[in-house]
Image: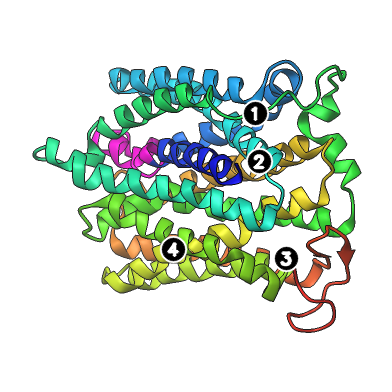
């Protein structure tokens, strides 16, 4: 029974992230090919705007009136329709970006919903969730390989990433996931019958109930690290094109291969390192990645670029997946959904929104009237998020003092191997 449940949840995660990966790592290349080089930060702006709006939708509708699997189904069906429409309006940049906003308003609530659905049906978060979530990473990998190696056969004279095929792939996959969602285990609304308040909708109630110095520092650090993080999702695809890579989506999937490997190993790392050191190593990996990109840029050093991409496993798993588990362990069943929604709001929402706008303005300042940055300009560009991430990591290392055991009890923070064993 448990194996069947895990399989169904794994398929959900696979499709959830296949959908995201199919367009998120290629849309800037597509827009640049259609005369929107100075607007490529806008998809990475409307995405966090939707993440900010997601808690309102979840709190007012999904948590109170409808089963989670049904809301997932409807949102992915609507999102599929919007994404299929996007290539039809590419000649009008404003309308194109608005259609992407509509799509993201459908998609972003499903991140919190899929996590909450999985957590609702599993018993051991640290052991089961990474093994389920890893299939989301596999889905992202398959999306990138499909675009570069399969869709690439259907285009001539351009990269597959420069064509509308990735957007159509996203739309069709969204429709399939929408239909599949209706077959998922029944997950009743978590707050049925409870009054809707502003505090519960945006996660203020969860913020208060989880309130402690370490938790506040974690949220602040998560918010801050997402500002330089936005630069990777927006501009890494343009950087690898400038460095001479032809299979952009496939190249970037190296990061997801690394992510999948570290997800499988996460239970071991939890026991050896604990929460603080997992989070800190994740932050330092962002510093190393951007520094590698900067050092590689002038001569387009292939191995340094690939190593920087491969660090994604540590960058993402050690910080974001660890953060999701940390928040879940600090939560109670009554506020689990709110707490996960709050984390999405702070990271994928406000943090990524500010990061996209700041990164876009910095990029456009380097760009000027040109169509693309030179490799020397890329070096200067990548040193900026590296420095910012280093400052955030230092702040977190000096201020965060919290440890969470497997039973969820808080204990004093200590270095690995000292005092109470890490979870």
Tell me: residue 97, above or below residue 396. above
Q: CA distance from mark 4 to mark 2?
A: 23 Å
Query: How many labels were placed on the picture?
Result: 4
Nearer the observer: mark 4 or 2; the answer is: 4
Bin the neighbour count of mark 1 within 10 Å (Cα to Cα): few under 14, some 14-19, many 20 and up.
many
- Which residue is disc 2 drawn over? 344
Say which element carries label 3. helix
Numbered circle sitting on residue 275: 3
230 over 175 or under it: above or below: below
Magenta segment's dominant SS is helix
**Which residue in the structure is indicated by mark 4?**
258
The spot of residue 246 in percent (x, y) is 20, 53
Mark 4 surroundings within 10 Å by alpha-carbon count, few (fewer than 14), some (14 through 19), many (20 or more)? many
Mark toward the viewer: 2 or 3: 3
Marks 1/2: CA–CA distance: 9 Å
Residue 129 picture location, percent across and down: 62, 51
Q: Are marks 2 and 3 in contact (CB under 8 Å)?
A: no
Q: Nearer the viewer, residue 372 or 76?
A: 76
Residue 297: image quadrant is bottom left
Q: Where is mark 1, residue-wise?
A: 54
* Range of residues picked out in magenta: 22-39
Residue 193 lies in what quarter of the image?
Answer: top right
């Amino acid at each position: 029974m448990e194996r069947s449940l895990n399989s169904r949840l794994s398929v959900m995660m696979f499709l959830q992230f296949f959908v995201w990966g199919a367009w998120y790592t290629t849309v800037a290349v597509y827009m640049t090919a259609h005369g929107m080089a100075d607007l490529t930060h806008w998809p990475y702006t409307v995405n966090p705007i939707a993440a900010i709006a997601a808690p309102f939708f979840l709190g007012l509708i999904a948590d109170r009136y409808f089963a989670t699997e049904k809301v997932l189904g409807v949102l992915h069906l609507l999102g599929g329709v919007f994404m299929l429409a996007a290539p039809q309006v590419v000649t009008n940049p404003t309308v194109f970006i608005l259609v992407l906003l509509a799509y993201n308003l459908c998609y972003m609530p499903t991140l919190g919903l899929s996590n909450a659905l999985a957590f609702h049906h599993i018993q051991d978060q640290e052991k089961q969730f990474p093994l389920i979530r890893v299939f989301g990473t596999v889905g992202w990998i398959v999306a990138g390989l499909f675009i570069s190696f399969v869709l690439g056969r259907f285009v001539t004279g351009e990269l597959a990433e420069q064509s509308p095929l990735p957007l159509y792939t996203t739309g069709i996959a969204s429709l399939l996931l929408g239909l599949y969602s209706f077959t998922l285990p029944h997950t009743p609304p978590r707050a049925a019958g409870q009054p809707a308040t502003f505090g519960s909708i945006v996660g203020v109630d969860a913020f208060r109930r989880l309130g402690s110095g370490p938790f506040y520092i974690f949220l602040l650090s998560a918010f801050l690290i997402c500002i330089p993080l936005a630069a990777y999702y927006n501009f890494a695809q343009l950087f690898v094109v400038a460095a001479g890579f032809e299979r952009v989506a496939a190249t970037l999937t190296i990061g997801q291969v690394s992510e999948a490997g570290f997800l499988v190993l996460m239970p071991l790392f939890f026991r050896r390192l604990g929460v603080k050191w997992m989070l800190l190593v994740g932050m330092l990996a962002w510093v190393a990645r951007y520094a590698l990109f900067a050092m590689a840029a002038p001569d387009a050093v292939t191995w340094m670029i690939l190593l920087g991409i491969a660090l994604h496993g540590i960058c993402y798993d050690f910080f974001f997946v660890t953060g999701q588990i940390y928040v879940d362990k600090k939560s109670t069943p009554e506020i689990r959904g709110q707490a996960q929604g709050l984390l999405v709001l702070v990271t994928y929402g406000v943090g990524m929104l500010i990061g996209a706008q700041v990164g876009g303005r910095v990029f456009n300042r380097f760009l000027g009237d040109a169509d693309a940055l030179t490799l020397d300009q890329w070096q200067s560009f990548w040193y900026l998020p590296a420095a910012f991430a280093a400052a955030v990591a230092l702040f977190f290392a000096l201020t965060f003092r919290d440890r969470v055991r497997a039973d969820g009890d808080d204990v004093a923070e200590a270095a690995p191997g000292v005092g109470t064993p890490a979870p």
